[in-house]
Amino acid sequence: ALFAQSVHRAVQQVEAVRSQQKMMMEERFVSLAKERLATQQIQQTETQLQVAVENEDYELADQLGQIIEAHNREKAEVASVLQSIADGLLHLESQKALVVRGVAT
């Protein structure tokens, strides 16, 4: 009976870890999409910036430069989130291994 309880508790813990992993993977997917979007927006804005400079529209060039900076900040924030997710997934994987090892001993 004690072993059965131990196994049941371990199964619940593994299911909880899997649920957390699924949520993190979904968050990772969204963050990767945000990163790709920011990269595209930076590229498009840089193209517009070149045109503005060629046309000597320095006011527009300044505005576009600020937009590029904002996208770069957003991209850095997303990179930080992605790193946190990667760290969290590694932690969850080690937790799952400890739960399974605890039942096996």
Image (cartoon, rainbow, N blue to C red):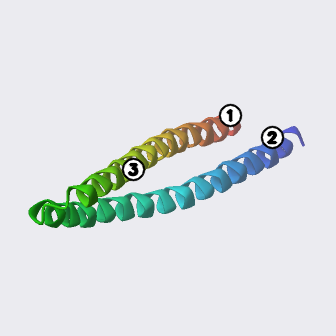
- Residue at the image point whose x is 80% and y is 44% from the top: 9
Q: Image check: 88 left or right of 104?
A: left
Q: Image check: 29 left or right of 64?
A: right
Residue at numbered disc 1: 102
Q: Amino acid at mark 1?
A: Gly
Residue at numbered disc 2: 6
- Residue at the image point whose x is 60% and y is 58% from the top: 22
Q: Amino acid at mark 3?
A: Ala
Give me the C-alpha separation between circle 3 and circle 1.
48 Å
Which is more N-terminal, label 1 or label 2? 2
Q: Is 42 placed above or below 12 here?
A: below
* Element type at mark 2: helix
Residue at numbered disc 3: 70
For the C terminus, the quadrant is top right
Q: Which mark is residue 16?
A: none
In contact (CB < 8 Å): disc 2 and disc 1: yes
- Residue at the image point whose x is 58% and y is 42% from the top: 92
